[in-house]
Image: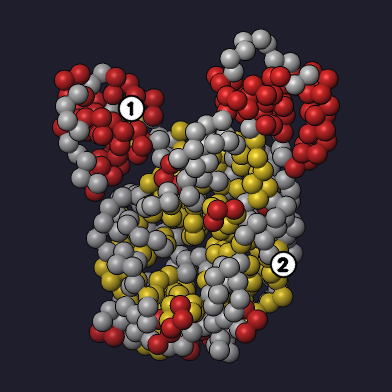
Amino acid sequence: MSSPLVHRVDATLSPDPGRVIARLFLPGEELLEEHSRTGAVAARVLALPEEEVEQLVAQLLVDFSHRHRGYPELLRAHAAIVAPHLHNEARLSAARTLLLGATFTAEYAVEAAALCNPSAVLHPDQSGLQPGQARIALSLRAIGEGHLSSIGFVSAVVGPGPQWSFDPRVLPAVCGVCSPAQWRQCHLRAVLAETESLDGLAEIILAALPDEFTERELELALSEAPHDVLVRPGGQATLELLRHVVTSAYEVTFPADVEINQQVLFPATAEESNGLEDARFVRFTDPDGTISYRATYTAYDGHHIAPRLLISPDLRTFHAHRLAGPAAHNKGMALFPRLVGGEHLALCRSDGESTSITRSVDGVVWSEPEQLQAPQASWELLQIGNCGAPIETEQGWLVVTHGVGPMRRYSIGVILLDLADPTRVLARLEQPLLRTMPEEREGYVPNVVYSCGGLMHDGRLWLPYGIGDARIAVAWVSVPELIAAMVPVTRANTAS
């Protein structure tokens, strides 16, 4: 059973199949072994009588304009992408252009399969609230057709007292505008070094790049590289890797009239082609007092995972970058909300089963991890890890954890780390804080309660959590009561 300390509230979120986005659809290119049918399909669009085209387009605008922001512009953009397949150079009418675009567009329900793994931070906008209330922003893992994950958002209001209410989720869902991001030369060097790709050609290209550069400047450096080096064995592989790595960084911006409840961060690079998973957000305070929002998430391409970083000043513009270093090789990194001892710190699980801590000078390249806690209790026999960013209290860093036990049953626990030296585990809750109740057993993945981050408000730890990797619930616990219930530990019995 769950701890008597924890209180569930009557606030839930379930997947909404009506939250759809419009994606480019190229028939025959969904599966690698098939051939594109784009040219043949486009020819059939060109062959339709103009009167029928106009009727089709009029109905499309009625049926879909309310489901997608800027629907006609989106169709014209998709038409432009397939235009090279047209063999008839006759100018297309406005209606036929829209029909061409619609023929190569498909709706995708971003959370038709599941909604899970929430992460909560204080919302940038705290206006219009009553005393004792706070507005919360939550990221959500949305899972759709093909188990493809994206990051969605919802806002909520907490307080006064033990009250939590989710705000209405506005439609239509909106993907942001994507553009290339800047790189730092030292960051690219670190990524290449850990993949053992710092060969002679890579060194020449790095030397030709400025300290900060874009994809365009990389292409300029590649065009000016000596020909005899480019054609040496391995040269093309290095070029492909450089382009693959640099194009994996991007910036996403949402228009000012799009609410946070509408925003969707959808896979934008090859690294993310099979999903963005388990974002762990934190409201980060720089030494000069500047506030930003940061999150680690897992990119999946169908074969490999890659820990990545999001940075946002306002939860409206997001910069996505690859992480590097010995600690950036597994799921579940969670950033501390400020520098500790002048360094960035993060929790991680680089060995796949234990909780460790890692350090970074710049928040991007992470050092060899140091183990904090190994599986020990019966409810964490398989593995343990964090459930989001550490939360600062006067008594120490409160870390919500998860453990996986027999029958792959997930439970949620808590440990307390020393404020000045977070490598020291001060105390732990010996029994789970939260376990699945009988009515929470079933789901997309049975026997799971899991969170990617809670927050503290008015003396309570608020913990939104996923049930069965399928839906969202919320619970709270008194922080003083929680800390009082924890048992002091020594280093010998935490990392053993």
Q: Is residue 476 above or below residue 352?
A: below
Quadrant where the image shows the C terminus: bottom left
Name the residue located 65 percent from the left edge and 81 percent from the top edge: 439
Of residues 219 and 257, the one nearer the viewer is: 219
Name the residue located 63 percent from the left edge and 67 percent from the top edge: 471
Name the colour scheme: secondary structure
Quadrant assignment, res 199: top left
The residue that label 2 is drawn on is 165
The residue that label 1 is drawn on is 218
Indicate the position of residue 440 as horizontal and vertical percent values. 62, 78
Q: Along the polypeptide, which appears first: circle 1 or circle 2? A: 2
Name the residue located 26 percent from the left edge and 68 percent from the top edge: 370
Indicate the position of residue 56 as horizontal and vertical percent values. 80, 29
Of residues 345 and 223, the one nearer the viewer is: 223
Indicate the position of residue 452 as horizontal and vertical percent values. 51, 65
Q: Is mark 1 on a helix, strand or loop?
A: helix
Asked if residue 418 lies left or right of residue 92, the reply is left
- Can residue 321 be seen from the camera position used here? yes
- Can residue 480 be seen from the camera position used here? no
Quadrant assignment, res 100: top right
Asked if residue 258 lies left or right of residue 346, the reply is right
